[in-house]
């Protein structure tokens, strides 16, 4: 039985992620309580805004020891969204250098876009680099909603998809039971709904 | 490939959806939540929701459309975000950081700031630091006077002395994530965008510019996408009077090889 826990550190998109998961008919709660994190089968870390601000709130509001035990020892399925993806890296360089959670080796750096506008806002395609359950049955709809100026750099072996905006950046990754996406499935209509269903179907 | 966005703008006045002409006359179009649901089903890329009421009174007496209208603007945002899984920008009466926080918590993704930026430009910096640049859209209303473009203050219905290009660059420096550029002169006329104005701003700022004001035909969207560097094209009135309007506009742009998402009709329930 799927039970979803959405972590809450005041990130702007918590409500939207909750609305989508609940609309899809799953048992879902927004909580940082130990008991909810422990009893969940799937954990989602949403995020918008800047890296440093998010890390500041995550380290003070989320019981990281409990979370880490569930993700690393109990292998709970985990999905990071946008800044919730970025903070999994070791370091972020938005408004100065900040430590991330360091769950996945890598950094977060400004997008290289030449003359294109920044932030990168709007619908863009994903280019699949590695097959994954996350992208099952998406059909020909491969565009998702992005809104960010920074993106992760990590080891090639973790890359699921790339996206092009000025240059290619990593738009989704996977390391064992940890999944993360730079785009916003909760704002990506059909494609986003399918992706969340796919994630919650992984056991 | 990144797509250009096609964005319907909904104007709300005292709880009702309205049509606007030259920023002064407003015609009632009915229930705002139903309109959003419809627009969402037509596969809209994004939505901008602006509360243009000049006071806090919500007109609950009118029931000439057979349903009572008892919702405050905040309740409308909350309802809307439950049924539409697309990005929503919300604007109107933003005075404090808490106003932004409240709207984001209810499900808005971005906040459009207009009047506040005219008398306190530092607020743009404060709010983009707190919530991230991606969250702050500065809405700039523009009017021509003596062959020059000036920022227009819609709350006080008067022209300011602010030069539009300088003002746009300033809000960019303050950390705005996007500029919603609206021509007051073209508002509600249906004669097309002010292409010269769009170029003036989009060629000189690095943040995305959303074009607004004047669309009367689908090809007006195309004109802006072909002749300017705007990132997105928006309109209000044109989307309200035709069934499947957003879908049809998108289809037109897709078939004329503009870089837009494939048109699609979604079923919400």
Image (cartoon, coloured by chain):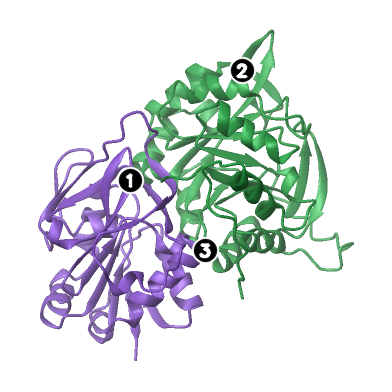
Q: Nearer the viewer, mark 1 or mark 3?
A: 1
The answer to whether mark 3 and mark 2 are in CB contact below 8 A is no
Residue B233 picture location, percent across and down: 59, 39
**Residue at image point 70% right, 43% down:** B236
Q: Within 10 angstroms of label 3, few (less than 14), some, or many (20 or more) residues?
A: many
Q: CA distance from mark 1 to mark 2?
A: 37 Å
Q: Is residue B105 visible?
A: yes
Q: CA distance from mark 1 to mark 3?
A: 23 Å
Chain B: its colour in the image is: green
Pick out the residue farthest to the bottom.
A1
**Residue at image point 82% right, 50% down:** B28
Q: Which residue is mark 2?
A: B150
Residue B163 picture location, percent across and down: 55, 15
Which residue is more in the foreground, B115 or B34?
A: B34
Q: Is residue B248 left or right of residue A124?
A: right
Q: Which residue is mark 3?
A: B85
**Residue at image point 32% right, 37% down:** A166
Above or below, B92 relative to A133:
above
Q: CA distance from mark 3 to mark 2?
A: 36 Å
Above or below, A107 relative to B70:
above
Q: Is residue B151 visible?
A: no
Q: Which residue is mark 1?
A: A164
Q: Chain of mark 2?
A: B
Above or below, A181 relative to B220:
below
Q: Nearer the viewer, mark 1 or mark 2?
A: 1
Q: Quadrant of residue B60?
A: bottom right
Secondary element at image label 2 = strand
Secondary element at image label 3 = loop
Q: Quadrant of residue B139?
A: top right
């Amino acid at each position: 039985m799927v039970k979803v826990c959405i972590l809450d550190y005041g990130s702007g998109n918590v409500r939207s992620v909750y609305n989508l998961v609940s609309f899809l008919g799953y048992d879902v709660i927004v909580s940082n309580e130990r008991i909810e994190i422990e009893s969940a089968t799937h954990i989602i870390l949403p995020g918008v805004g800047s890296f440093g601000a998010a890390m500041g709130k995550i380290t003070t509001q989320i019981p990281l020891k409990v979370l880490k035990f569930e993700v690393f020892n109990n292998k709970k399925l985990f999905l990071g969204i946008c800044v919730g993806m970025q903070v999994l890296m070791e370091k972020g360089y938005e408004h100065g250098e900040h430590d991330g959670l360091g769950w996945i080796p890598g950094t977060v750096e400004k997008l290289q876009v030449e003359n294109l506008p920044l932030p990168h806002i709007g619908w863009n395609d994903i280019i699949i680099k590695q097959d994954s359950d996350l992208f099952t049955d998406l059909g020909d709809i491969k565009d998702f909603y992005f809104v960010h100026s920074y993106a992760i750099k990590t080891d090639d072996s973790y890359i699921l998809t790339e996206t092009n905006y000025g240059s290619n950046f990593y738009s989704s990754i996977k390391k064992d039971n940890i999944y993360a996406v730079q785009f916003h499935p909760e704002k990506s209509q059909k494609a986003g709904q399918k992706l969340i269903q796919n994630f919650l179907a992984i056991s | 490939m990144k797509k250009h966005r096609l964005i319907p703008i909904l104007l709300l006045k005292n709880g009702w959806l309205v049509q606007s002409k030259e920023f002064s006359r407003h015609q009632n179009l009915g229930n705002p939540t139903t309109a959003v649901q419809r627009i969402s089903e037509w596969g809209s890329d994004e939505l901008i929701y602006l509360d243009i009421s000049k006071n806090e009174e919500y007109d609950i007496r009118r029931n000439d459309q057979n349903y009572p209208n008892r919702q405050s603007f905040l309740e409308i945002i909350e309802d809307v975000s439950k049924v539409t899984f697309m990005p929503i920008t919300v604007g109107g009466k933003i005075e404090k950081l808490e106003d932004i926080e409240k709207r984001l918590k209810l499900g808005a993704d971005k906040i459009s700031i207009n009047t506040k930026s005219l008398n306190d430009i530092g607020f743009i910096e404060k709010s983009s630091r707190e919530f991230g640049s991606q969250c702050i859209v500065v809405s700039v209303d523009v009017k021509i006077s003596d062959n020059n473009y000036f920022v227009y203050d819609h709350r006080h219905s008067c022209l300011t002395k602010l030069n539009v290009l300088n003002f746009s660059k300033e809000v960019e420096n303050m950390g705005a994530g996007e500029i919603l550029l609206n021509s007051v002169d073209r508002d509600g006329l249906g004669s097309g965008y002010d292409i010269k104005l769009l170029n003036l701003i989009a060629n000189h700022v690095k943040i995305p510019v959303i074009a607004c004001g004047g669309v009367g035909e689908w090809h007006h969207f195309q004109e802006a996408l072909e002749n300017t560097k705007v990132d997105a094209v928006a309109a209000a009135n044109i989307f309200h009077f035709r069934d499947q309007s957003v879908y049809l506009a998108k289809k037109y742009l897709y078939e004329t090889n503009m870089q837009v998402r494939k048109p699609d009709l979604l079923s919400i329930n």
